[in-house]
Image (cartoon, helix red, strand yellow):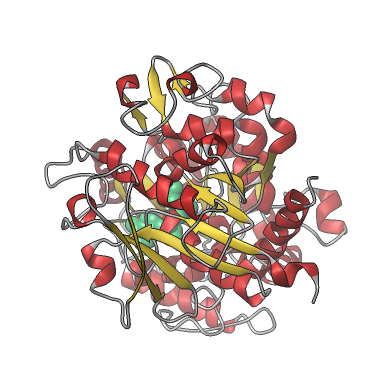
Amino acid sequence: MPFSQSIKILFITPEITPLLKTGGLADVSAALPAALREHKVDVRVLLPAYPRVMGSLKNVRLLTTLTNIGVHGEVKLLEAELPGSDVPLLLVNYPLFYEREGNPYIDADGQDWADNAQRFALLSRVGALLGNSNSPLDWHPDIVQCNDWQSGLTPAYLHFSPAPSAAAIMTIHNLAFQGTFPASLTTPLGLPASSYSINGTEYYGQLSFLKAGLFYANHITTVSPTYAEEIQQEPLGFGMQGLLAHRYMDLTGIVNGIDVNEWNPATDKLLTHRYNSNDMSGKAAGKRALQNRLGLEENPDIPILGVVSRLTHQKGLDLLPAIASFLLEYPAQIVILGSGEASLETTFQLLAQNHPGQVATVIGFNEELSHQIEAGSDIFLMPSRFEPCGLNQMYSQCYGTPPVVHSTGGLADTVVDSTPENIANGTATGFVFRHVTTHGLNECIHRALDIYRDQPTWRKIQSNGMLRDFSWNRSAEEYLALYEMILKGY
Ligand code: ADP
C-alpha cells in the first residue's frame, strides 16, 4: 500500500457546506476532505453538533461518551456521513454549548455568544483528545488539521498533553478573526498558566486562540503562497506578523480549489446559454441576454466589465466610480452585483442612474445572476486590496472572462498577466496591476480593453484561462504532499 493510502487526518472545523455556512471555510471543509478521500486519504471531519447540522443528517450513531473533558457532565461523540458524499463526520454533542438556533458565533442581536471561549475550547479539546494515544476511539489520526481560531487551542492542548500521537496543522483562512478572550480564562480552559506568555497564547494582553494554534502547531498553512508571504509583514499580518515571520520555514500556502461541477460554462444550468473553449457562441448569446436583462445597450462590440463582490473596503471597488466615465467613453459597459457597505451600495446605484444603458447595478445576493455575469461579461474586475485566496478570479478564467486583478494573495497566484512575453508563450490569462490606486486600476483596465480590440490575441488569453485546472483535486495533491512531508519530519 503506498504511503499516502495510510494517512489519517482529523479535520476540525466550526462549519461545513451544505449543513451550516457563514463563509468560505464551510466550502473548504466539505470540498477538501472529499477531494483528499479521492486520493485515499482517510479524512474525518470534527464539528459541533448544532441543531441545523443534526437536522440534515441521517443515520447518526453514538461513538463514545466523553467525561472529564473540561465541562460539567458528559459530552457525546456522534458519527454520521456528510450528505451527498462519503465524508465521515464526528460530531461533538454538548447541548448546553451547541443547541442554539441561528449563527454559530453570534446571537440574534449580532453579539458574540458570551461563552464562545468555552464552546470552541471544547471543540478544540475533543480534537486534541482524538490526537492522543489515550483517545477512546480505535481510529487514530496522524495529523489534526485545525481551521481558523475556533480550533486554535487544539495544538496547545496537544502540546501540553502527556501522550500526543498526532502532529498539528493550523490553517489560516482569515487572519482577521483571532478568537481573543480575557487572559483569566487560561486556567479555567485547562491550559497551564505558563502557556499565557509571549511564547504561547498571549496576544496584546489577551488570550488568543489563533495565536495558540500558530505557536504550538507543527505546521501552518494558508490559502495561497503569496498570502503566506504577505502575512509575515505589516499590514496584513494583523499583529501576528512577528510570529509568522519567525515560523516562515513551517508556513505553506496552498490555493483553494473551486467546485468545477458548479462552475463550468459547458454544463452550468444557471446560464441562459452554455459554451466551451472550442465554441464560444454561447458566450456571445449570454452577453446579449445579460445586456437585455439589465437594460444595457444590446451591442456585441461594447466590452462589459463585470463585478460580483461583497462591497467592502477590502475589495477595492471604491476606486471604480472615479474612473467610470473614462471607461464608459472607451466605450465599455459596467455591471455590478454586490452588497455590503451602504455608502458603496449608494455610489454604485447612483452610477447606474447617471449612466442608463451603460451601467447596471444590482444590490443583493443572487447566485443565478452571478453565474450570468461571469459568463456574459468580457472582463472581470477584482481590484482587492488584499485577498487570501479569492474565488471569482478563478471562476472568470474558466468562463473566458479574463480578470483584472491587484497583485495580492491568491489573485497574484492564480492570474497570469498578459505581458507580451506571457501572451507569446501561451500562459497569459488576465491582467495584473501592482498599485491599488485609481491610476493603477485605470491603466490596467485600459490595457485589457486595448487587447480586447485585438480579437485573435483575446481569444488566446480566454482559452488559456478556460483550460487551466482550478479543481480541488490539484489542491488535494498539494495537501497530500505536505502531509507526507510533515509525517517524515520534513
Ligand atoms: P470573499 O469570500 O472574500 O467574499 P471570494 O471571491 O473568495 O470572496 O468568494 C466570494 C463568493 O461569493 C464567490 O463565490 C462570489 O461569486 C460570491 N458572491 C459574492 N457576492 C455575491 C452576490 N452579491 N451575489 C452572488 N454571489 C456573490
Whether residue 9 is visible: yes
Q: Position of residue 85 (x, y in %)?
A: 47, 80
Q: Toward which corner of the image does residue 244 lie, by quadrant?
A: top right
Q: Toward which corner of the image does residue 190 lie, by quadrant?
A: top left
Q: Toward which corner of the image does residue 222 lie, by quadrant?
A: top right
The residue lying toward the viewer, choosing from 448 and 34, is 34
Q: Position of residue 431 (x, y in %)?
A: 66, 49
The residue lying toward the viewer, choosing from 110 and 346, is 110
Q: Answer with left or right where residue 12 lies relative to residue 249.
A: left
> Quarter holding the C terminus?
top right
Q: Position of residue 125 (x, y in %)?
A: 41, 46
Residue at 64% x, 51% y is 448
Q: Given the current orientation, which residue lies at the most extreme left position?
A: 109
Residue at 50% x, 21% y is 239
Whether residue 336 is visible: no
The residue lying toward the viewer, choosing from 194 and 220, is 194
Residue 82 in the image: above or below residue 381: below
Quadrant position of ligand 1: bottom left
Residue 217 in the image: above or below residue 62: above
